[in-house]
Amino acid sequence: MDEPDKPARIALDCMGSDRGPQELVAAAAHLSLRREDIVITVVGDGQVIGPLLDASTYDPRRLSIRHSAQWVHPEERSREELERKEDASILVCCQMVAEGQADAVVTAGSTGAAILAAERTLGRVPGVRRTALAAVTPTELRHGPKQDPFALLLDVGSTVTVSAEDLVTFAVMGSAYARIISDNPRPRVALLSNGAESHKGPAEVVEAHALLQNMEGIEFIGNVEGLDILRGTADVVVMDGFVGNVVLKMIEGFGEVVSDLASDAHGRKFLWRLGLNMLSSGMKEIQSLLDWESYGGAPLLGFTQPVIKAHGRSGSRAVANACKVAAKVARSDMAATVERAVCQFPRQGQGTR
């Protein structure tokens, strides 16, 4: 966005989420009544989302519908379906941003479809070979001037196979994003490995470590292990998408286990109930910190315009928070900041659009 005082225009893909379009429509209606700085276009099958919107209370000045009869189901093959469905909702959202009709995309649908649609319509930042899905996770230590209680993890599901150069690019993009979102001028960046020593880990991690050690402009602190993530040893933790997705889902699962323990306490033996009651305040704090819905969506870094991926299981609160993240990212001109950061990386190969 070139004008920070203008409302951020969000193209919200209402199709393809695990919980159906009703949660996304509810989030859009809620925001239209409470956020004058956000304008949302809900994109999807008008015959489905129209009645949902009609049954909602919303401000028509800040919420409209863009009909798209087709969409990509999470279980479908994204590439084939996007070739076949030229009017797929995620493609329409990305095209709106490409044509200047919106400032950012938010989707709770297929990650693969979002990546392919963005590559087709928006293109990657020059020099970015692989994009990265970045997500925040709570930490024990607080970070930066704002004392944020979370760290940024990337990649958490965009790319499975990476090179050392890809990992370095993730580090550059993650550092740039953390500087904007957390107002942290020197975020600490680390590689996730199986030991702190520079020679530990797969070949691409060892090579990336050597490259990052010699880079100016990145506060590289070396390798960290899995136990360091929640401790908050680093502000940005870099890994390949396979490992990152496993780590993220493990953290989410831990939060759900804590929630289940608290809710099932009444069915336990007396000593269990007593112990859980004694720990209740701490468990509530952990549950609150690990509540992924409160963190909104994860940006797909490396595209020329903002694309925010919400969890497939997102309810209306999570979708609303994802739209808020998208608005903040759009206003900050994050994509241009990432592009400038990547261009300063001297060893970066030529990216493709």
Image: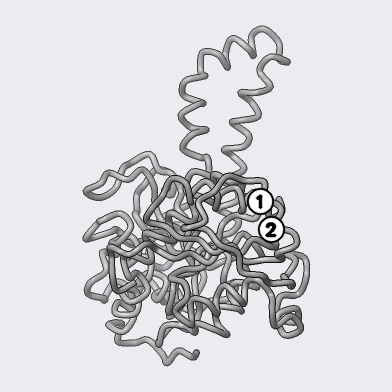
Residue on which disc 2 sits: 50
Residue 35 numbered tag = none
Between residues 351 and 324, which one lies in front from this camera angle? Answer: 324
Quadrant for residue 242, please give it.
bottom right
Q: Is 250 on the left-hand or right-hand side of 124? A: right
Residue 201 makes an appearance in the image: no
> Residue visible at 74% across and 80% down?
85
What is the basis of the colouring in this image?
one colour
Q: Is 267 on the left-hand or right-hand side of 8? A: right
Image position of 228 with respect to 50: above or below = above
Residue on which disc 1 sits: 54
> Residue visible at 43% across and 44% down?
138
Query: Residue 288, image x and y in percent?
Result: 48, 34
Residue 257 makes an appearance in the image: yes
Q: Is 169 on the left-hand or right-hand side of 146? A: right
Q: Amino acid at mark 1?
A: Asp
Image position of 86 with respect to 189: above or below = below
Q: Is 17 on the left-hand or right-hand side of 189? A: right
Between residues 343 and 23, which one lies in front from this camera angle? Answer: 23
CB under 8 Å between discs 2 and 1 = yes
The extreme top residue here reads 270
Secondary structure, mark 2, is: helix
Cα distance between the residues tagged 2 and 1: 6 Å
Query: Residue 208, image x and y in percent?
Result: 40, 74
Q: Amino acid at mark 2?
A: Gly
Query: Residue 174, image x and y in percent?
Result: 38, 66
> Residue visible at 69% across and 14% down?
266
